[in-house]
Image (tube, grey):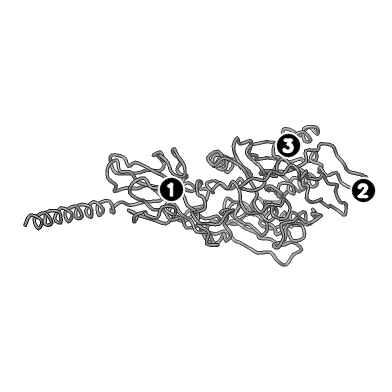
Amino acid sequence: MYSLRKFVYFTRKQFTAGIISALSSYERARSVISVEPSSSLIDKKVRILVSGLEPRQDVTLAARIVSENDEVFESHAHFIACKDGRVDVDRDSSLGGSYSGVSPMGLLWSMKPAAEQRKGLRLVKRDVTKPFNVELKCFDDHIGSPSRNTSVQRPLSSVTFEKWFMADGVKRIVLEDKRFRGTLFIPPGDGPFPGVLELRGGTAGLKEHKTSLLASRGFVTLTLVYITSGISSNSGKLPPVMELDYFEEAAEWLSKHPMVLPGGIGLHGNCLGSWLVLMLASFRSDLIKATVAVSPTSLISYTSYKYKGKISENFPVDESKLIHMEDGVVLRYALPTDNDDNGTDSTFSAIPPYQNISCPLLMIIGTGDLTMNVDFTARQVYERMKKNDKGHMCTILRYPGAGHIIEPPYTPHCYASFDPFSRDSCYNPYMVWGGEMEAHAQAQEDAGQRF
């Protein structure tokens, strides 16, 4: 009889506890996440609010993006609700997780590949006509990364918002009927608009995310497939010669486009693309009226350039100074730092005539760049312009702790990733780009606002 009463007592106790737990879960399930605006460009801040929580409740916000290649990137942050049961990511400090402190966009820039993803991934927008869909969930308590925690409970609430690289009304035109191939973006409106030729770094394939974003901000922009003047889709090796005439032809075509303001165009390039835009600015001061070089290099060891039938000399890379790490290879210290011209009557010097640049030049560099010797490049270009009394036209933005891949604001920092050039030319499939995550995020936000 005693055992029966004891059984009934504990059964009632467990039942009551279950009801209380269920009611508590129901109350907490009434929480709501709001994101404003729910659809916006990648470089525009959003405001994330969670309401309907218990006063001082510990919660975790977790964000997730699935790329076009089904690669999963995620982040999470720990918060404590205020006395009104709200979390305001604009106001409240993350106490841990993927980032710490107050950062309205921290859940985006701190994203990393989720658990069990393959090594060497980098989040890149491949189809700019579609947004990144960001899934945001709120969990009770402070928990670890959802993909790494097999015991994660159901979320209290969730929402999905969109981040675009191309604004409504921007026209995207694929160019295939010319000697050059690429994509043209035209902003909405009657125009004409400033024109910009945007050249990506030395990675295979056409990447349009910066070009489309510039068009969304009011520029007619053109980006190019390098064809014979760049990396093929099957190999990471640079061709032995880069034909500068190819890029010059595209620049001239853009400058004459009816939707482009007359009088010349601007250039924007990063990494290998920075070398190309710096050369175009050096040889075509009549055409180029402004230049932005991100993570620039003034010397390329793996190829020469050719212009008007004349080829350049080269400075070799010192392969003994390649540093192979667990994350990949560090290229920076193996690159040449020559300052003496080595041209002849029949060849150009490996150092292009940067002293001839006659337009405003902005160079954006990170001190944590482990791919290019950006400090050397900035000094070399500036000193050559200064000798021609043009030093005042050169501006250098130097960001402590930032790495090589300086992308639009709020895009995730990438320390190292798979790279065909690294695989085929540096004997390692992974390139170390460098940088510290928070410093890099701050650099991207500031640089994006400046140019």
- Find the residue positioned furthest to the right: 345
Q: Identify the residue at the far bottom of this view.
A: 177
Question: Which kind of residue does numbered mark 1 sit on?
Answer: His
Residue 63, given in percent of the width and then of the height, sits at 44, 52
Read off the residue under disc 3. 376
- Separation of marks 1 and 3 at Cα, in angstroms: 38 Å
Foreground residue, 23 or 425? 425
Task: Judge the density around disc 1: few (<14), some (14-19), many (≥20) Cα neighbours within 10 Å.
Answer: many
Residue occupying the point 73% across, 39% down? 377
Nearer to us of marks 1 and 2 is 1
| Mark 1 touches mark 2? (CB < 8 Å) | no
Residue hosting label 1: 76
Q: Nearer the viewer, residue 403 or 363?
A: 403
Q: Quadrant of the N terminus?
A: bottom left
- Amino acid type for the residue under numbered disc 2: Ser
Marks 2/3: CA–CA distance: 27 Å
Q: Where 56 falls versus 69 (above or below)?
A: above
Name the side, left or right, on which 119 lies relative to 271: left
- Image quarter in which the C terminus is found: top right
Q: Are the residues tagged 1 and 3 within 8 Å (C-beta)?
A: no
x 77%, y 38%: residue: 337
Dot 2 corresponds to which residue?
Answer: 346
Kind of residue at badge 3: Phe
Tag in front: 1 or 3: 1
Q: Is residue 215 left or right of residue 427?
A: left
Please tell me which residue lies in front, 139 or 151: 151
